[in-house]
Amino acid sequence: MRLYGWIGLAILASAEAFLFAGDPVIAANMTPVAWTGYILLVDAVVFRIKGSSWLTTRRSEFCLLIPISVISWLIYEFYNHGMQGWHYIGLPENLWVRGFGYFWAFATIFPGLFVTTDLLLALRWFRRCRGKPRPWSPPALRVLFTFGFFCLVVPLVYPSGYLWPLVWMGTVFFLGPINLVYAPDSLFRDFAEGDYERMAALFVGGLICGFLWEFWNFWATAKWYYTVPILSNVKVFEMPIVGFLGFPPFALECFAMYQTARVVLKF
């Protein structure tokens, strides 16, 4: 395994050790530190399996992935301003330190999801997820695009915690028809060709990352709390159990948003 993979493993192990030893710096930055180590480790494992990865053969693309991850997550923060799905506690009082912490944490979201998905694809666990090709008809694409637009607009007009499912679904349906035509990769194209392997890997990758997000968040001192209005008292770590249903579609959304960014930035 590449050296940076061992460095990632050392970061993860050290972070856990310092956290439970009561180190206040690691406790306040557990989420970005742990995810940095995780991304380094998993990317190195992916390279070990298939000979290519984000940090070895796609470095320039990875550099663009980081700001795309930050900007994309800020869109959800904008929705959360009205819908109040989560809030943060224990943040540093210094605004510059807080801003750096936000950027670092948000910058690991897309990389964490995508290296996890790449690992699942490299392991070929979902290679049998294939079916009959079903090409999209123009009317069907228009309906899905309109539905996605509806899902994204309604929570802005009528912000409510009960409408988060619309947000988690809307981006895929809104951007899907656009990516089908213009993007280098598209989930809608995969579906049309009867290839569900990447969708399955993203679904499971979303659940894995969701569990890890909540696991590392639970022990941190700078952390987020949820205000999910359904079964809010039935939790795994800080996440109400029903909230975990949002991680698989969230992974699909992240992939769709990244592909649209590739169209806009032309890379």
Image: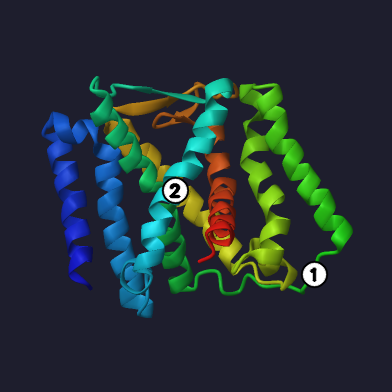
One can see residue 209 in this view:
no
Quadrant of the rendered structure where residue 266 is? bottom right
Q: Residue visible at 30% across and 39% down?
A: 31
Q: Which residue is mark 1?
A: 134
Within 10 Å of disc 2 (Cα), the crowding (few <14, some 14-19, many 20+) is many
Q: Is residue 153 above or below residue 114?
A: above
Give the mark, 2 or 1, whose residue is nearer the N terminus.
Answer: 2
Of residues 234 and 136, the one nearer the viewer is 136
> Element type at marker 2?
helix
Q: CA distance from mark 2 to mark 1?
A: 31 Å
Residue type at the position of mark 2:
Ser
Task: Please state, as top left, top right, bottom left or bottom right, where the N terminus lies in the image.
Answer: bottom left
Q: Position of residue 89 (x, y in %)?
A: 34, 21
Residue lying at the far front of the rendered structure? 265
Residue lying at the far bottom of the rendered structure? 51
* Left or right, 65 with reference to 168: left
Q: Is residue 230 above or below residue 201?
A: above
Q: Position of residue 165 (x, y in %)?
A: 65, 36
Model colouring: rainbow
Q: Residue visible at 41% across and 66% down?
A: 119
Q: Residue visible at 62% across and 32% down?
A: 164
Quadrant of the rendered structure where residue 92 is? top left
> Element type at marker 1?
loop
Which circle marks residue 69 in the picture? 2
Q: Residue visible at 67% across and 28% down?
A: 155
Within 10 Å of disc 1 (Cα), the crowding (few <14, some 14-19, many 20+) is few
Count of residue discs:
2
One can see residue 65 in this view:
yes
Residue type at the position of mark 1:
Arg
